[in-house]
Structure formats: structure tokens, C-alpha cells
Amino acid sequence: MPVEFESVVTVSAAKQIADSLRAAIMDGRLKVDERLPTEEELAQRFKVSRPTVREALKRLAAQHLIRSRRGPTGGNFVASPAPEDAARSLANATTLMVAVGDIGLDDMATARLELEGVCCRLAAARGDAELAAPLATMREELARQGEAALTDEEFCASDVRFHRALVDAAGNALLSYLMHAVVEALQPVSNMIIYRVREREAILGFHARLLQSLETRNAEAATAALGDLVDYTRDRYREALEKRAERAG
């Protein structure tokens, strides 16, 4: 049975059509892998031109809600949710919010401490086989961070990979999605600001404590190490901003 859509006015018609189709996808009236009506059919149903429909479909494609396929059996189909795309969109939006000042230092530090703290507790409760891969990655990154020849950029990238492995160790898909914004967006932004004033040996010390605590399944010690790392990062962040203000003055 065809899905029924309400008529729309011509002002911002493409957005209204996209919103209407999106609602049908989100509430299940349009199922994953279901073929959408053709552009001509949609134009007739919404009483708009085909270019307007095409613009609406572009909006949905940009949101990864639909995908197109060529050929005799082609068309536009409802896309299966892609966690990587959704997480990337979240990280991009978070980076923008930091850039314009909507997310500040305290918010960044609090979110990181609370969310990664949950990861530590979940990871500490898991078995050896489940933690083998993420702990191995953390060991590799810790060793890499101790290399004297490592550039600042490489150290920051390793820092991100280390904490990404910590998130993986928790084994929670939803938490992993939410943490993408913290690890992939907030942490690199923080690193870019404080890398000139932080000491690598200090970061290595915090990371070593965190890793050792997880290896022994000591959630309390892991959370304490993380808290000290976040406090250190917060202090270095403020120091960097003060130095920047002094240079500007």
C-alpha cells in the first residue's frame, strides 16, 4: 500500500518534502531497503516540480537516509543506518560547536571524565578474551608515545588512538557512538591548543597508570588515573589560553 504524504506549500518545498520523507523513514512507514516512489510520482503527490523533488532527495542523501542505485531496478532506496557516518556527523557538529564557543573547557573536561569513566568501569568488568585486542592497541600506542623522534602531530594522533582503544574496551555500541564526538572531535581540538605546554612524560605516566589499571581490572584506579589526566589537561588548557592572551596583548 503506497505511503500517503500530506501536501506542502511551495515556499521551502524541498525542505518540507525532505522532512516529510524523513519522518516516514524514522517512524517506519518507509522501511530500510524499500524503494521510494520515482521523482515524477513524488512530484505528483506533493504537487511540485521534479527539480524541487530532486533537491529534497539530495537533502536526504546528505543525511545518509537514502541511497541511489542505477539500472533497470534502480532508484532511490531507504538506507540502512551507518554508525560510522552518524558518528562522523556528530563529531563534525561537535567540532563546530567548540570552534564557535558553544562548548567550553569545563564542558569538554566534564564530558570526557564522565563518559570515559564509564568506559573504564565497563572495560574492567570484561573478560581477558574481550579485552585482548583493545589492550594490545593501548600497549602499542603507549610504546609509540615514548619514541623521542615522534612529532607533535604523531603524538596527538597516537593519543587519540589510545583513547579510542579505551572506548572499544568498554564493548558498548551506543557509548562508542557517543564517545566518537569526545575522542574524535574534542580531544584533537584540545591537543592542538595545549601541545606546546604539556609534557609528554606526564601524559605517558597517566596513560601507563590507566593501562595498568585496566590490565588488573581495577576500575577505581583506572578512573582515578583518568581523573588526574583530565585535571592535568584542564590546567594545561588554561595555561595555553593565558599564554595566547599574553601574546595577543
Image (spheres, rainbow, N blue to C red):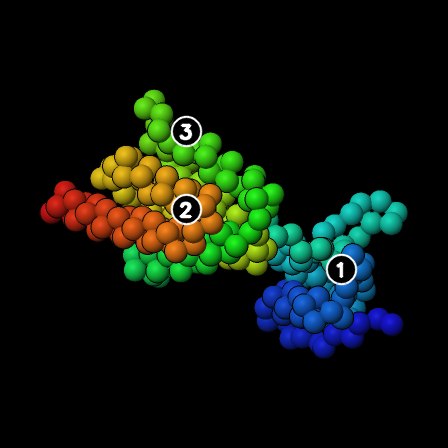
Residue 63, percent from left and from top: 61, 56
Distance between mark 2 and mark 3 Cα atoms:
19 Å
Q: CA distance from mark 2 to mark 1?
A: 43 Å
Question: Eyeballing the image, is 199 above or below 88?
Answer: above
* Pointer 3 local density, CA inside 10 Å: few below 14, some 14–19, many at least 20: some
Q: Nearer the viewer, mark 2 or mark 3?
A: 2
Kindly state the secondary structure of the residue where label 1 is placed.
Answer: loop
- With 15 as the anchor, is 46 left or right in this view? right
Between discs 2 and 1, the one toward the N terminus: 1
| Residue named by callout 3 | 144
Viewer-proximal residue, 128 or 72? 128
Q: Which amino acid lies under the numbered mark 1 shown in the image of this protein? A: Val
Q: Which residue is mark 1?
A: 32
Q: For the point 35% across and 29% down, which residue is it? A: 146
Q: Identify the residue under disc 2.
A: 213
| 225 with respect to 17 (left or right) | left
Relative to 149, 69 lies left or right: right
| Image-quadrant location for residue 143 | top left
First of labels 3, 1 by sequence position: 1
